[in-house]
Amino acid sequence: MKVLLNKFNRANLSTRLVYLTTFVVFLVTYIIFLINVLRLEGIETTLRIIVLTVLGIILLLYGFIDLLLLLKKKNLSVYFSSIFIVIISAACVIGSMTINRVLTSIGSLSKDTVIYTTNLIAMNGTEFVNDNTFVTGIINNETDVEGYILPYELINQEHLQIKLEKYDSYFEMLEDLYAGKINGMFVSSNYTITYSVYDGYENIKDETTVLKEYSKEMKNQDYIENYASVTEPFTILVMGVDSTSNTLKKASSFNGDTLMMISFNPHTLNATVFSIPRDTYVPIACLGGEESKINSAGAYGTKCVINTVQSLTGINIDYYVKVDFQGVIDLVNAVGGIDVEVPAKVNFCESNQYRSMRQEDLICISEGLQHMNGEQALAFSRHRKTLPAGDFQRVQHQQLVVEGVAKQIKNVSSVNDFYTILDTLAPNIDTNMQTKEMLSLYGVAKNAFQSNNGALINVQKTYLTGKDNNIYVNNLRGNVYVFQYAPQSLQEIVDAMNVTLEKKKATMITTFKFSANEPYESPVVGQRWYAVEGTETVPNFVGQNLNQVKEWCNLRNISLNVVFVHEGDELYDSTLDEGAVVGQNVGRVLVKNINAITVSAVTHFNPDAQTTTTTTTTSTTNTPSDDTSSSTTEETTSSTTANSSNTCEDPQGNC
């Protein structure tokens, strides 16, 4: 050993420095590269082992062989081999930087922290007064960050003396704000997008003003921990987010117009896709099961949407992905635009990404093959009002955009273009899927290409059938259009998803029909028309006779409460017959959701007596009675104040 050390010390000094420097640099870069490559868990494991093994062998060979060359004073050979090692070291550095950048971008898709913002808004022209005369609405939910937690922090921070009025619903709060019953209200900064799609609030951005704003970066309250593996069947919920911010790091509440539930089986490479119509009438999880449009759940955050969909389908959601519609523009532009075959008879103009309807800002789309830029793709994905099938057709358009983007991404060959796509996705996507799961999807995609000759997955399409209705929705505080799904159609879709998840065995097809003259098309799951249960709504009884109302209630086992009005009462009309109905406490609501109705009816008797209330408890009957007076009833009369007859609780104002 001493002899070798002496020979090494007698070697050329500059050669020794080159050898030692090169060896140390190679060793350090190899270790860094090794650490980064090992982070690529689940991606090309065999290839990674081979690359790391080869580099390790080169490192050992260089250290041993060049040492011998150095001792033999073959300086030129040391220099040439060192140049080769420097090139390899540079490649390790570039590889480490590339891996680190990709993993950083992928990791940023899951937002650990979010900037939450609350706004104190008021109608235009309202001046803020810091005392208890300024009545302010606040949501009655202690877990609501932007509607409850941040407002109280703002109040304490600025020592506000305003009077707070608590509400169970943002829509009820908005209704009172517009009616002048409160001076202001606390709401998410994304309120203009969230509520402008509802009747009566289309111009909320121009009709309201922000009096105060308070922001705070906090841990993502909507993040849902998940331990499912993407190497086993899993479900994922894709939510389209339309926000005023250009990044999901600043978005909490949103307009949940696009909901797509996907079950995927990595073993069979089968996927079942369930696009849920925005107006589907379902129980909203965070409102105690109160029924409303499913898109209204977005106003209460991601967890509310996920819990609502889980309750609807009975299927656990493993992962979620929120995609900002504004990011569609950047993504489509990043891939150089997309080619879309716009369906026949689809010609429309839509507002731009800022929802401006000025003539010069409109984005117009026409039928036929179109090469769309980002603005056009967003307009095509967002528009629904003039489409024959409305939201159902819009979902199909969104799928065309997704297919167009997927085709263009396949053609990306430039590293810079790849980086651009990653940088575009990072701020516009939020998911609870961690880096490990995302990397595991690489293996799934690779298997799909190899097994299906380039076709990614076998997609089973679904279509939820049902019935259009217009009813009073308490959560939305008005009569609105809703889509009532057919339970049989939903069950068929749920069964298909469970088959994909390997939780249910597929039903074997025993008969098969086809025509040699027509190409075979796979049946769309759920696309059969069924009778929708429980779609009957309470009619307008005003103008009908009390006996007719009694019979209607009797047939449906609904209790009837009658408030008689007489001369001197506001609702009294001397031209009406005895027992004519002049008001009711419920409007166009679903019959299945009520068990009692109160109506006001005219009486021309006992003009000097106070108003009487008659409670009629109806009994269940299987067949209609021809004689309405023979219906089994039990009547009780009690004295009330005359003013009670003037109370109108009918949402439609039919009192």
Image: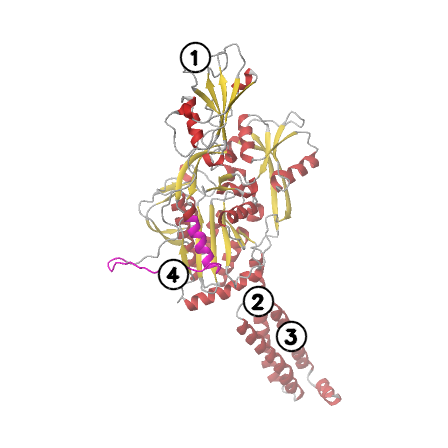
- Pointers 1 and 3 in contact (CB under 8 A)? no
**Residue type at numbered disc 1:** Ser
Residue 299: x, y in percent? 54, 41
| 420 inside magenta stretch | no
Identify the residue under disc 3.
27
Circle 1: element type: loop
Identify the residue under disc 2.
41
Magenta stretch?
489-518
Residue 591 can be seen, yes or no: yes
Q: CA distance from mark 2 to mark 1?
A: 83 Å
Q: CA distance from mark 3 to mark 4?
A: 60 Å
Q: Residue drawn 44% across and 50% down?
A: 491
Q: CA distance from mark 1 to mark 4?
A: 69 Å
Residue 164: x, y in percent? 64, 30
Of residue 463 and residue 580, the one placed in the foreground of this image is: 580
Circle 3: element type: helix
Answer few, some or many: residues within 10 Å of disc 2's Cα (few below 14, many 20 plus, some between 14 and 19): some
Of residue 259 and residue 270, the one placed in the foreground of this image is: 270
Of residue 438 and residue 565, the one placed in the foreground of this image is: 565
Residue 423: x, y in percent? 53, 56
Lower sequence index among marks 2 and 4: 2
Scheme of image coloration: secondary structure
